[in-house]
Image: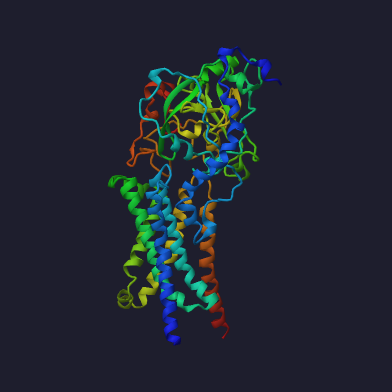
Amino acid sequence: MRLESARARRRALRLATLLVGFAPAAGLVVAFLHDGLGANPVEKITHETGEWALRFLFLSLSVTPVRRLTGWRMLLQERRTLGLFAFFYASLHLAIYVGLDLGFAWSFLGEDILERPYITVGFATFLVLLALAATSTRAAARRLGRRWKTLHRAVYLAGIGAVVHFLWLVKADTREPLVYAGVLALLLGSRAFWALQRRSRSGNR
Amino acid sequence: MSKRSQQPSENEVTPESLYLRRREFLTRSASAGIGLGLGARLGFAALGSGLLAGCGPDEASAGRRAALPTRTLSTRPGPAELQTDEDPTSYEDATRYNNFYEFGTDKTDPARNAGSLRTEPWSVAIEGEVAKPGRVPLETLLAPHPLEERIYRLRCVEAWSMVIPWVGIPLGDVIARMQPTSKAKYVAFETLHDPQQMPGQRRGVLDWPYVEGLRIDEATHPLAILAVGMYGKVLPNQNGAPLRLVVPWKYGFKSIKSIVKIRLQESEPPTSWNQSAPREYGFYANVNPEVDHPRWSQARERRIGELRRRPTLPFNGYADQVAGLYAGMDLAKKY
């Protein structure tokens, strides 16, 4: 009986994650169909997919702190899905930029990556997410063993890279990227805090 | 100061729609606001408020949607050789996608917040190296000049562009009436500074008030105009009502909006974006596909309404008319 309800809760949580994950994409499609993307639709979907990649990256990073604070262990099963949604939106973001913004002009892409620091950082961040997504299966984790954990710590770098990418592209109003930077500081800071706590506790022993 | 006593003869009068429109449209703004607001919010506000609500743009800013003017202005066509025959951008796009940081930094903010700007009465301070400095009611400033339509390309420094049929008067004619002294080498402009009417000024995104400037030979070039309308109608608030500069061969930020002061002076005046980021925005800010913004390319642009980018032209396609103003200058240094 208890087992049954645990499984039901697990399923409900899984369903909720998938709904939340696809909702922004569905929202964009609806907005597109209803001419709700404004005067510059390409810019709009570029910005929206980029921001959703950032949001899902932060959601995946918040699983561990939230689990520690609330003791809700079941959340852990959703971390990978949230991370994959971050990769999904980052891929859309990159595809829109390369396809619609640059019109697949590869020379412009090369120039952008080499010469524009915010694009350099954004592209590097995408490569990190790509590596993490490619090694996100159980089989890959088994194969990589201890190195898997080291590799997947690169998600912190991706978080920093994504925020820097945002911060460097705005013209003058840095408020929005700075809010993201603040949230990221909390997410990474909580980990540093717990790590220090652990170390001092083991040091006292 | 009585406006009536200074009114010129009947045939010179600027159409009254310019000055009567505000109150008339206030009543319309409520319904228009609801209709347009719904459309704009359809996909995104609801969506963005979802997970990390604090991260979205500030939806709760205090502004009011500005009603779009409907009365037409009577104009004559401007000189054909100065104009483009390209299709104008849709009026809807030209009035809902604006950079006007006084009303917020998102390009949809000005349409949403510019309703709090009061454009009547409006006067302009004429200062500096002129025969008779003083404060002039807008009607008086415009009265001697017939309104012309000028269809110009507009190229934003952010690499998007539009085609706008402006209604205005040559800036050179206005300057000539000011009777500049021999020391008048530059023209400095200033936007209204009133955080009550311009909610974007409550944050220090730029150093308010917004200021801009031109060399006197640029300002008196036939292409430079002071605009009071567009698409045959009075300027909407979000487009810089009631009086704005239009210098089509320069990036859009040079075309300062809602002007309250024009000052002729001997030294180069400070300009807002140059003060904010001197490495990125120069005093001249001529459209130049060869000189990239430090953070993005200026080689191509997206014409609003088109999907693919198109190449950006030197001086925004006005090189034949204005390149001579910069003969011998290193435009990579004087960007």
Q: Residue at x 52, y 16 (%)?
A: B146
Does residue B33 appear in the picture of this structure?
yes
Residue that appears at 37% across and 27% down? B317
Q: Nearer the viewer, residue A192 or B106?
A: B106
The percent position of residue B95, horizontal first and vertical second, equals: 48, 36
Query: x and y percent of residue B80 in the render?
Result: 39, 18
Asked where in the image residue B131 lies, by quadrant, the reply is top right
Query: Please, which colouring scheme is shown?
Result: rainbow
Count of picture labels? 0
To which quarter of the image does residue B202 belong?
top right
Q: Considering depth in this image, is B111 or B38 the residue closer to the camera? A: B38
In the rendered view, tell whether residue B93 sits above or below residue A134: above
Q: Is residue B135 left or right of residue B295?
A: right
- Is any atom of residue A128 visible in this view? no
Q: Nearer the viewer, residue B326 or A158?
A: A158
Q: Could you tell whether A198 is left or right of A134 in the image?
A: right
Q: Residue furthest right?
A: B1
Is A150 drawn above or below residue B153 in the view shown? below
Q: Residue furthest bottom?
A: A1
Q: Residue B260: image x %, image y %?
A: 61, 28
Relative depth, front residue between B292 and B144: B144
From the image, which quarter does the N terminus of chain A lie in?
bottom left
* Position of the C terminus of chain A by quadrant: bottom right
x, y (%) of residue B185?
A: 55, 21
Q: Residue at x 55, y 44 (%)?
A: B104
